[in-house]
Amino acid sequence: MISIVVPVHDEERSVALLYDELRSALEPLGTPWEVIFVDDGSSDGTFGALTRLHSAEENVRVVRLRRNFGKAAALGAGFDQARGEIVVTIDGDLQDDPAEIPRLLAKLDEDFDLVSGWKTRRRDPLTRRVLSRIFNRVTGLFSGVRLHDMNCGLKAYRAEVVHGLRLYGELHRFIPVLAHYRGFRIAELPVNHRPRGHGRSRYGMERYLRGFLDLLTVSFIGRYRHRPLHLFGGLGLVLGLIGTAILVYLTVLKILGHAIGHRPLLMLGVLLLVIGMQFFSLGLISEMITSHHEERAHGVEVDEEHVSVWDDLRHGWTAGPGRALRLVAAEARLFTRRPRKVDVYLVGYPGHFDLLAAHRAARGRPIVFNPLVSLADTLVTDRGRFRPRSPAARTLEAIDRRAFRSADLVVADTDAHARFFAELAGLDEVAVCFVGAEERLFHPGWRPPTSFTALFVGKLIPLQGVETILAAARRTPQIPFRVVGSGQLGPLLADRPANVEHVPWVDYERLPGEIRRAGCSLGIFGTSGKAQRVIPNKAYQALACGAPLVTADTPAARELLVNGESALLVPAGDPEALAETVLRLASDTDLARRVATGGRAAYERHASETVLGARWRGIIERLL
């Protein structure tokens, strides 16, 4: 579907004419489309005209703002309502030509994420054309995005570009810049521009002045939001070094017997050194504020107590005499640490043995346990390390029950897992919160590659269904598979087919690039009970990157995903179905784009940091 977003303000005479032109331009494409008119506090009969149009046309939707909030807010409201995989914006004053939309869509299909119109022959007053040219040059200089017409109202986007945009002030002018900083590909296309037929322009010199200030904001946030010390610290270092060099020079002159007290250079050196120290201090404070804000985006301050046991292992947590001694030493350190004054103690994965130290520190305050896994389920049922009903298996089950029952609240990652935990430990309630992804790394940027590769990332354990993936690869020799990981089932890769590349390890910071370059990401395909109850981290990471996901059709997956819309779900343990699905994605770019867009939308609705932060706060507040 194509969603057309039209912000309007006092355009009563234009909206019906614009809809007719949109219909003429879009109906020949044979693709479903909708128009979302956003009435930005009109004072004439615009809303009445839109209401009549909505009654007459099924694909017309109307959003009405209480007052005139500005174009940025109007576009944001329209983006929130857009349901299409492609979103097109066009002004409501009839100066933008709807007949240009098919050309924008064709350009978008050339592997771009945003196509901006360029009014090569503007039908506007000379002063406005001159100011616009200056504005575009300055914007390109500051942001690095070289467009001739940054503020053209006629643009086409993939839906993942506009999802999550926070538009206010004059930021609608800088949507290409915001998209560029998020890793999207941008193109520009000359379009027809027509004289204004009705109404009058409401944009004056003051808009450009406010826009310039917003440009500084966008450039700073885009480049230095997560690393302010690089800016302030760099400036401070340069100024401090210059000041130090001046003072060293004057010190040498003083030693040689020259008077320096009356020299302005002394004052300049001291001033530069002090200002440099202030800039550097400002950078450090900004880093602290940034870190603090990310921790408490929902008003919750997080104070972490961590002692490393498994952090140096590529295969995650494993057992052994040496590791057991490290675990005992770590638990002793946690147990003897001085308790801190906090409201709630949260024990995370795999924290079964940490609860004793947590109870000592909590001193009656609530304890929340977020285990993610059952030790018995993982080591006995899934990985087969111990026989069922053996002494070791019974011991692990007892550890699970004791840990779950000792917490004031247990939080699981899926409803399916919550039911399992409740039955295992006899709990009346287990809360649920999805895992999500680390959005500073995993953010949209996927696009269909020129060479399709199916990517698997994860530990080679039974949960993953490695045998199913290798069998599917043998059925599709024309499709390259890239397997990243190692572990228990690593020997299976010794006899892998020629189209399977094995990479034992990729640094965590490089994983987003792997996902964005692949044709699709593979989830889990194991048939164990645990495989039916979990959504793996890599699934959230693929969705966060806006990449197509193929995973097993399980009860847990159905809690987040819809087959054919937000992911492609195949029967667990069925290599034939997996092979057919990968072939479909490799041969159908439109399907891949549709699933990728739907997956990103599902992530934003149910598993984004914003959603999960609010969910966690709600869970914690229930205990206070």
Image (tube, rainbow, N blue to C red):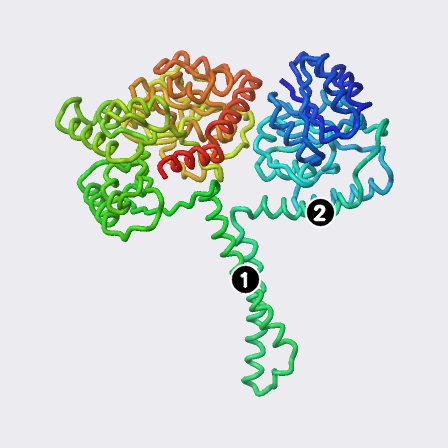
Name, please, the residue furthest toward the bottom.
257
Q: Is residue 217 positioned above or below 508 on the image?
A: below
Relative to 622, 101 lies left or right: right
Pick the residue in front: 66 or 99.
66
**Which marked residue is nearer to the observer: mark 2 or mark 1?**
2
- Residue name at image x 19 percent, y 38 percent: 320
Q: Residues within 10 Å of mark 2 (few under 14, many from 20)?
A: some
Q: Position of residue 171 (x, y in %)?
A: 66, 39
Pick the residue in front: 222 or 550.
222
Q: Name the secondary structure under disc 1.
A: helix
Q: Using the rendered image of the protein, determine whether residue 232 is visible from the camera's viewpoint.
A: yes
- Disc 2 to disc 1, C-alpha distance: 28 Å
Q: Using the rendered image of the protein, determine whether residue 105 is visible from the camera's viewpoint.
A: no
Q: Is residue 435 positioned above or below 304 on the image?
A: above
Relative to 228, 63 lies left or right: right
Q: Are marks 2 and 1 in contact (CB under 8 Å)?
A: no
- Residue name at image x 42 percent, y 46 percent: 301
Q: Which residue is mark 2?
A: 212
In the rendered image, which quarter is residue 408 located in?
top left
Pick the residue in front: 196 or 379.
196
* Dot label at residue 352: none
Q: Quadrant of the C terminus?
A: top left
Q: Position of residue 617 (x, y in %)?
A: 42, 37
- Residue name at image x 60 percent, y 72 percent: 269
Q: Name the secondary structure under disc 2.
A: helix
Ranked by sequence position, the earlier of labels 2 and 1 is 2
Q: Amino acid at mark 1?
A: Leu
Q: Position of residue 267 (x, y in %)?
A: 62, 75
Q: Amino acid at mark 2?
A: Phe
* Dot label at residue 237: 1
